[in-house]
């Protein structure tokens, strides 16, 4: 079992939304002030809710907290009331396959993302799904099967009306953007130069030019135009995600 904990001060409930993995644009930085530095089982705890296990991080909007988990063979999306910790709904994803994963990983590692009302989740054993505020399934997009023996860790993000997801694996890696209203694929860019990876993309907005999706991967980091998926630039020199690694030097292409 795992426990989801919220802090025991009014300001915590007024804190800024944390809608995706590592918060605003994946920075891991919150603009909230005055939050407690210490908390534990009997200190600064507002409520505690027992949940099934999972490695995803919770995300939250004004009223709701979303998390993914697994229970037996069931892949779950769970919505909780932010004020009370009450479980509002649980929904099970289809699972017609069980892929391998590293022993310390699990089938519910990618974090959800929310637009403030709806939630979007990714499971390596199925693909993408979206649920409405009341738990109604809005759409589903099967993906895979994947060739990633360690299992998935990458989380989807929302940007400029697109749901963006990296699907890096030992063969057939790609970056995909879908319409968050209906799950329709807007573009899909293959990444044959990348093997297994677990990063979550971030968005860069230059002063001039189109918004970019910055994607770390094995051996290099790359930029893609958010609107089209076109690869814009890349930098070699990153480590790979498995051993042995071939040597690499850093080179910038524009």
Image (cartoon, rainbow, N blue to C red):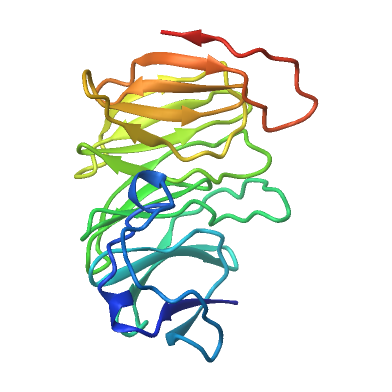
Report whether 175 appears left or right of 69. left
Report whether 17 appears left or right of 195. left
Q: Is residue 128 above or below residue 221?
A: below
Image spot of residue 5 (x, y percent) = 46, 78
Residue 119 vs residue 36, the one in the foreground: 36
Q: Is residue 51 above or below residue 57?
A: below
User: Measuring 56% from the left and 10% from the top, which residue is drawn there?
Assistant: 251
Residue 127 vs residue 233, the one in the foreground: 233
- Do we see residue 100 in this rendering? yes
User: Measuring 24% from the left and 58% from the top, which residue is drawn there?
Assistant: 118
Can you say which quadrant of the picture contains the N terminus? Answer: bottom right
Can you say which quadrant of the picture contains the C terminus? Answer: top left
Image spot of residue 77 (x, y percent) = 41, 63
In this rendering, the count of numbered labels is 0
User: Measuring 57% from the left and 69% from the top, which residue is drawn there?
Assistant: 53
Residue 58 vs residue 221, the one in the foreground: 221
Q: Residue furthest bottom?
A: 42
Residue 228, image quadrant: top left
Image spot of residue 219 (x, y percent) = 62, 22
Image spot of residue 218 (x, y percent) = 61, 26
Q: Is residue 239 above or below residue 135?
A: above
């Amino acid at each position: 079992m795992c426990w989801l904990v919220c802090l025991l001060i009014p300001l915590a409930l007024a804190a800024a939304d944390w809608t995706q993995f590592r918060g605003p644009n994946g920075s891991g930085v919150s603009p909230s002030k005055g939050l407690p530095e210490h908390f534990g089982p009997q200190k600064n705890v507002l409520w505690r809710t027992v949940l099934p296990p999972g490695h995803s991080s919770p995300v939250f909007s004004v009223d709701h907290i979303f998390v993914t988990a697994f229970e037996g063979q069931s892949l779950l999306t769970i919505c909780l009331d932010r004020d009370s910790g009450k479980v509002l709904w649980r929904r099970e994803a289809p699972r017609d396959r069980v892929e391998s994963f590293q022993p310390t990983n699990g089938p519910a590692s990618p974090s959800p993302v929310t637009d403030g009302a709806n939630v979007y989740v990714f499971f390596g054993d199925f693909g993408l799904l979206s649920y409405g505020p009341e738990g109604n399934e809005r759409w589903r997009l099967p993906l895979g099967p994947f060739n990633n023996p360690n299992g998935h860790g990458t989380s989807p993000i929302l940007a400029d009306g697109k749901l963006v997801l990296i699907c890096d694996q030992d063969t057939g890696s790609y970056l995909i953007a879908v319409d968050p209203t209906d799950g329709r694929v807007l573009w899909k860019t293959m990444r044959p130069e990348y093997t297994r990876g677990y990063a979550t993309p971030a968005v860069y907005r230059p002063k001039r030019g189109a918004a970019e999706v910055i994607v770390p991967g094995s051996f290099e980091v790359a930029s893609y135009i958010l609107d089209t998926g076109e690869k814009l630039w890349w930098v070699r020199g990153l480590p790979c995600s498995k051993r042995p690694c071939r040597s690499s030097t850093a080179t910038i292409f524009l």
